[in-house]
């Protein structure tokens, strides 16, 4: 298991247990920081969460680095960052990935929307959408 570390929110310095000043302060700027508490032992996963981690392992991903919290993972696939979440209350697994940016040329936006609507009409289990549409 690794060592606890955090980034100082004031100066972005990487603070570790070896570098923290008086177990409380950033050695670079003196701001108060708190190191995360590392778990004594790794939690044994079961069910869908274990299946997701098994799949990530088969894809060559380090699941310890991929974990973003309880039932949440984040991995890189090519240039895309894929976020995976699992809701144990309804057994729903969701994956999000930002695949492209909106075109700057307004003439190209309509064909993109048409493509998204056509793809979403196919029974594939995938939903394509736009997030944070900012046009300049």
Image (tube, rainbow, N blue to C red):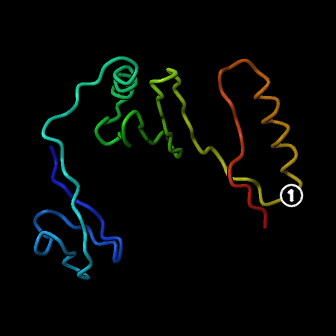
- The image quadrant of residue 23 is bottom left
Q: Where residue 122 sits in the image (x, y, percent)?
A: 76, 21
Q: Position of residue 80 (x, y in %)?
A: 53, 44
Which quarter of the figure is the N terminus placed in?
top left
Left or right of 31 in this view: 71: right
Q: How many marks?
A: 1
Look at 49% across and 39% down and name the residue there.
83
Relative placement, left or right, of 69 versus 30 is right
In depth, the one of 130 and 61 nearer the eye is 130
Q: In x, y percent, where is residue 90?
A: 52, 21
- For this view, does 132 lie left or right of residue 81? right
Position of the C terminus by quadrant:
bottom right
Answer few, some or many: residues within 10 Å of disc 1's Cα (few below 14, many 20 plus, some between 14 and 19): few
Rendered position, 126 above or below 5? above
Q: Is residue 8 left or right of residue 2?
A: right
Residue depicted at x 82% and y 29%:
118
Of 12 and 61, nearer the camera is 12
Q: Residue at x 86, y 57 (%)?
A: 106
The residue tagged with tag 1: helix, strand or loop?
A: helix
Which residue reaches farthest bottom? 29
Report the residue marked by disc 1: 106
Residue 101: x percent and y percent?
Answer: 68, 52
Q: Residue at x 25, y 74 (%)?
A: 32
């Amino acid at each position: 298991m690794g060592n606890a570390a955090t980034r100082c929110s004031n100066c972005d310095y990487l603070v570790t247990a070896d570098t923290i000043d008086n177990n409380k302060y950033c050695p670079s700027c003196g701001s108060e920081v708190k190191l995360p508490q590392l778990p004594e032992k790794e939690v044994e996963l079961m069910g869908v969460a274990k299946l997701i981690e098994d799949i990530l392992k088969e894809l060559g991903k380090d699941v310890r680095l991929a974990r973003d919290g309880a039932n949440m993972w984040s991995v890189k696939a090519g240039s895309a960052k894929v976020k995976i979440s699992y809701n144990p209350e309804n057994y729903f697994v969701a994956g999000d990935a930002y695949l492209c940016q909106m075109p700057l040329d307004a003439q190209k936006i309509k064909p993109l929307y048409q493509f998204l609507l056509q793809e979403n009409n196919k029974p594939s289990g995938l939903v394509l959408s736009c997030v944070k549409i900012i046009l300049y």
